[in-house]
Amino acid sequence: MLKFITDVLSVPAILVGIISMIGLIALKKSGPDILKGTVKTILGFLILGGGAGIVVGALSSFGIMFQHGFSINGVVPHNEAIVAMALKTYGTQTALIMAFGMVANVLIARFTPLKYIFLTGHHTFYMACMIAAILGAGGMSGVSLVAVGAVVLGFIMAFFPAIAQPTMRKITGTDDVAFGHFSTLGYVLSAWIGSLVGNKEKTTEDINFPQGLSFLRDSSLSISLVMAILYLIVAFASGQGFVEKELSSGQHFLVFAIIQAITFAGGVYVILAGVRLVLAEIVPAFTGIATSLVPNAKPALDCPVVYPYAPNAVLIGFLSSFAGGVIGMIVLLIMDKSMPGLPIILPGVVPHFFCGSTAGVFGNATGGLRGAVFGAFAQGLLITFLPVLLMPVLGSLGFANTTFSDADFGAVGILLGHVLNLFGQ
Amino acid sequence: MKILVCCGSGLGSSFMIEMNIKKVLKEINVEATVDHSDLSSASGIKADIYVGTRDIASQLTSLGGKVISLNSMIDMKELKEKLVAALQG
């Protein structure tokens, strides 16, 4: 019987189901609703694992082609892909850190001046996963891993919205809403650069910027297109003979490249569907409980909350950040000559879209058009170089062909990893 | 009656708007199913009303339902006005 209970609790899918069930009971839902919500959460977690399989398959052929074509290690940062892989090892720890991290966030908001409740559930989930992986790679385990992880998560859930708030006030014109998306350091950097170089009177919204690119907001589509370009480049670099002999079992190498690129997008799509199911009950429960326990706290919301305030800055920020990612990659390629083994961080379309766009809006708020352009460019460089330093502290996950993309993941991960190293020695 | 809220990856902001819509529906005593999704999936989901912020609302117009374009994700007053108008019209 004891074996049965410990086995049940060590299956991460069931554990997140139980967390969601506790939330549903706390919200006094009906029996059928509790059952439905719990089962759907478990289903979501299992779907996530399936998506990971698809993504890993597509990425490994990318990695092999990149390695063969350029003799270096190419990495496409993508949160969903790395999280889905990491959950295979750190699923239980992630679920527990997430649950107790949310409790810690509520306590911090209740008893300290950091009055922010972080409501972007998928980022809480991803951050919990990264913290679990880094603490695990640093040699921690069991209760101490979960306890330290939850305190760190709870703290950063309140801390990052706090440092974004001065610019958020400028963007939204109110102090009621906060900003919760873990690439905050990039946005604060963008806002700071905007205030140095720009003039906020000359805003992006006064120019007539073509909105034709807005179809790229459809993330499955933009992942497919940009990954297709990257896959085609590596397929050409490694050569038709190599691809058809080693990877595609005879399929034409360009067909193979395009299908693998869109398969990657398909894997991400499946992971997103899983994440959506996992969070469907947990986020409303957390929102309801947190806002009733800490009524004066500010809700910190996902990055698109700022997009309607400056739609031009959104597109300009994306392009400028992507340019920063390309330049950063070229710099890494040059540095690799003297530092062999350095991973080459390729510009991932999802981080540059969401983080770049948001950096554009932040830069515009402090420095107008120039602020949006230069601020987003700087954030594009930042999210290219942070993963290079993050990968060594991720343990075996650091050898994947993908990694965590957004700035706060990089900064928190690097800091945690090095603190653990200090204690380890 | 089905209402679908969309955003870029269908995770964060569409979810927040969905929760706000549910709040408004309760307030005005209307029964409806509310769900959220990413833009790709939206084309395969039949709904009576599609909701998005103004920067993506143009992508929802060809889906065959009414479209609510929000200027702000956080303005409950705007959301309520536009929702009531869409439900009546």
Image (tube, rainbow, N blue to C red):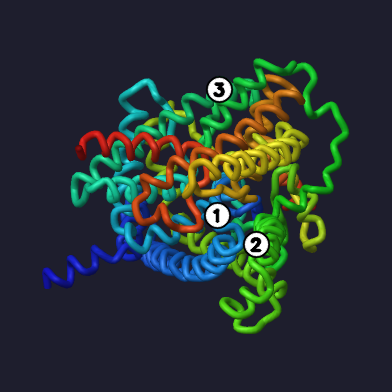
Report the residue marked by disc 1: A74
Mark toward the start of the polypeptide (3 vs 2): 3
Chain bearing mark 1? A
Q: Name the residue at 77% across, 48% down.
A: A214
Q: Amino acid at mark 3?
A: Asp
Q: Is residue A375 above or below residue A195?
A: below
Mark toward the start of the polypeptide (1 vs 2): 1
Q: Position of residue A290 (x, y in %)?
A: 39, 38
Can see residue B56? yes
SS label for mark 1: strand
Report the residue marked by disc 2: A234
In the rendered view of the protein, which quadrant contains the C terminus of chain A?
Answer: top left
Report the residue marked by disc 3: A175
SS label for mark 2: helix
Viewer-nearest residue: A150 or B52: A150
Q: Is residue A249 above or below residue A111?
A: below
Mark toward the start of the polypeptide (1 vs 3): 1
The reply, left or right, for residue A98 in relation to residue A69 is left
Are labels 1 and 3 assigned to the same chain? yes
